[in-house]
Amino acid sequence: MLDEYSATNLPNLKSMIAQNYDNVPQSQVPPVRGIGVLTSGGDAPGMNATIRAVARAGAHYGYRVFGVTRGFHGLWKGEIEEITKREVSEKLQRGGTFLMTARSKTFETPEGVLKGAKMCKVFGIDVLVVIGGDGSYRGARDLARIGIPVIGLPGTIDNDIASTEYTIGYDTAMNTAMEAIDKLRDTASSHERCSVIEVMGRRAGYIALNVGIATGAEVVLIPEHPYDFDTDVVKLILDGRNAGKHHYIVIVAEGAGKATDIAERIEEATGIESRPTILGHLQRGGSPTLRDRTMASLMGVHAVECINSGRLNRLVIFKDGRITDVDIEEGLKMTKTISEAEMERAKILS
């Protein structure tokens, strides 16, 4: 049935995805009865708290809430079950996502988007809440453009979604990295040693920058700002040694270099024993911090409030100290980066 539906409607789908989807006038929008929720992309601490908030707020306003297992991959495959307030109990403090997440090559195609839209119709999902990063938002936007209303919630440890100042999971990831680096400094201080720690951030250095400030790192390297190895790494370490230091911390975002390579180059240039540490997926795990639990919960409620008031195809954001929302097309056109001034302050503190 789905194959037949896809073959019949694929040309129209391609046309719809190629142009912006215009919202149907409010008077013509059918009433919302069912809300779907999924987590997509990399997992982030606080995703479970967000799902819980959507389920509880949905029940409060009288909606049926459906959990989609394994993100967009599970959506087009129909891995969908109704979830109640009781079923999200004891999820608030847990890391990861109990709905699971997965990458979906199929959903990146017009055929996959069409299958996902069809499954929303099959299960009575009138609005889909998508928790994830920019890639997840683009999948949600494709559904919105063919008539499946969506709400996006920012779930990524990298804090790299341009439309919002804060993303769910970011605070927990930074605290996890900070605690690990504090322990590494303890052992580095017992030797004349340089610890090179690689943190997550393939395209964004927010974790590296803020953790570097919080741990007193001598050097912070991020993908947004090119660096000269001799001037920005070697000289700073040698200046520290000449001033009497006996241990050094270098933090590098994964998009700015590899800890193993940088440690080898530092040791070769300075003669200081250098040890690489890659924190990797350690930063994704663990119970979410108070800030992530609170932000996740309040953003989840805001998503359902958007649905209840008829504001669809929106991204929930944190801006100027409050939770609000923005049109999904507008939000995906936004950009943000780490400024020279922010980097200069970090250097002053190093």
Image: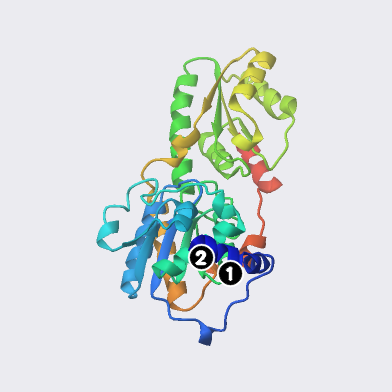
Where is residue 263 drawn, in percent x and y?
Answer: 61, 21
Question: In the figure, is residue 28 to the left or right of 31?
Answer: right
> In this orientation, does residue 317 appear?
no
Instruction: Check disc 2 and give the amino acid type.
Output: Ala
Nearer-the-camera pick, 127 or 329 = 127
- Percent position (x, y) of residue 183? 43, 27
The residue lying furthest to the top in this view is 271
Q: Nearer the viewer, residue 104 or 159?
A: 104
In the image, what residue occupies the spot 64% across and 22% down? Answer: 261
Q: Helix, strand, or loop for circle 1?
A: loop
Q: Nearer the viewer, residue 334 or 103?
A: 103
At a point 67% along the width and 23% down the height, the residue shown is: 239
In the picture, residue 52 is in which quadrant? bottom left
Q: Are marks 2 and 1 in contact (CB under 8 Å)?
A: yes
The residue that disc 2 covers is 117
Residue 287: quadrant of the picture? top left
Residue assigned mark 1: 146
Colour scheme shown = rainbow
The crowd level at tag 1 (other Cα within 10 Å; few <14, some 14-19, many 20+) is: many
Quarter of the image with the C terminus in it: top right
Front residue of 147 and 5: 5
Against 19, is 297 above or below? above
Percent position of residue 26, x then y: 53, 84
Q: How many marks?
A: 2
Circle nearer the N terminus (2, 1): 2
Q: Is any part of residue 268 visible from this angle?
A: yes
Q: Position of residue 31 (x, y in %)?
A: 43, 80
Quadrant of the rendered image containing residue 54? bottom left
| Label 2: element kind | helix
Which residue type does callout 1 highlight?
Answer: Ile
